[in-house]
Amino acid sequence: MKLLVGLGNPGLRYQNTRHNVGFMVLDALAADWGIRIEKKQGSSLLGQGFFAGAKVLLLKPQTYMNRSGEAVLEALNYYREAIDDLLVIHDDLDLDVGRLRFKRDGGSGGHNGLKSITEFLNSPDYNRLKIGIGRPHGVLKTEDYVLGVFSPEERQLVTAVITKAVEGVKCWCANGIDETMNKYNSLA
């Protein structure tokens, strides 16, 4: 089984914010695969289906970003899955809007959701898909920026990168992280 976790904050208030781009990618995957992410299980909403002959679980933690690790650990334990079968999809300030990057492991880069997951799993060794949201301009605080919505120009780039992310996640499910990094991290 593949456990795909999109990071975001629950509720309508946060629905279209930069911080919820992980949820947006999961929604696009769900639509592509005909999966409904609506079952409440523990601290998450989830949907189940199949892709490339393997069961896939789409998970949206409902714990808010800074407590995402609780939901991820809960799901890994419940489904008795290995950390190698986990892909965390999240926003990244260090990538420009419209860019993505697959990564095998690493630090949090200041991302509170990743900090929480690393803490709860007691390991930074999990696969990630980073979706670029860029950095705030001027005096806008980072917290206000990530909880803000994309501009109309950015929205076009985000729509395109979500499409590319769906393709990349399919590659990850079928072929693993190395092939996916080689193929998708080299794209402009």
Image (tube, rainbow, N blue to C red):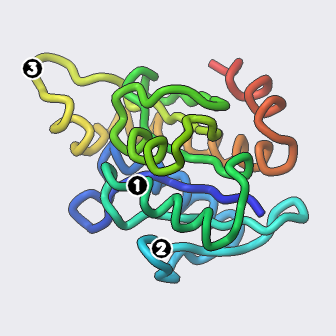
Mark nearest the camera among 3 and 1 is 1
Element class at badge 2: strand
- Quick one: label 2, few (<14), some, or many (20+) residues within 10 Å? some
Q: Which residue is mark 1?
A: 68
The one nearer the camera, 32 or 123, is 123
* Residue found at x 62% / y 36%: 125
Q: Quadrant of the N terminus?
A: bottom right
| Mark 2 vs 1, N-terminal side | 2
Q: Is residue 117 left or right of residue 16?
A: right
The one nearer the camera, 86 or 182, is 86
Q: CA distance from mark 3 to mark 1?
A: 28 Å
- Quick one: label 1, few (<14), some, or many (20+) residues within 10 Å? many
* Relative height, residue 128 to residue 97 (above, below): below
Q: Where is residue 152 drawn, in percent x and y?
A: 32, 39
Element class at badge 3: loop
The one nearer the camera, 92 or 12, is 92
| Mark 2 vs 3, N-terminal side | 2
Q: Where is residue 106 drawn, in percent x and y?
A: 55, 27
Q: Which residue is mark 3?
A: 139
Mark nearest the camera among 2 and 1 is 1
Q: CA distance from mark 2 to mark 1?
A: 12 Å
Type of residue at label 2?
Answer: Leu
Q: Where is residue 118 drawn, in percent x and y?
A: 48, 41
Mark nearest the camera among 2 and 3 is 2
Q: Which residue is mark 2?
A: 45
| Mark 3 vs 1, N-terminal side | 1
Type of residue at label 3?
Answer: Val
**Which image quarter: residue 18?**
top left
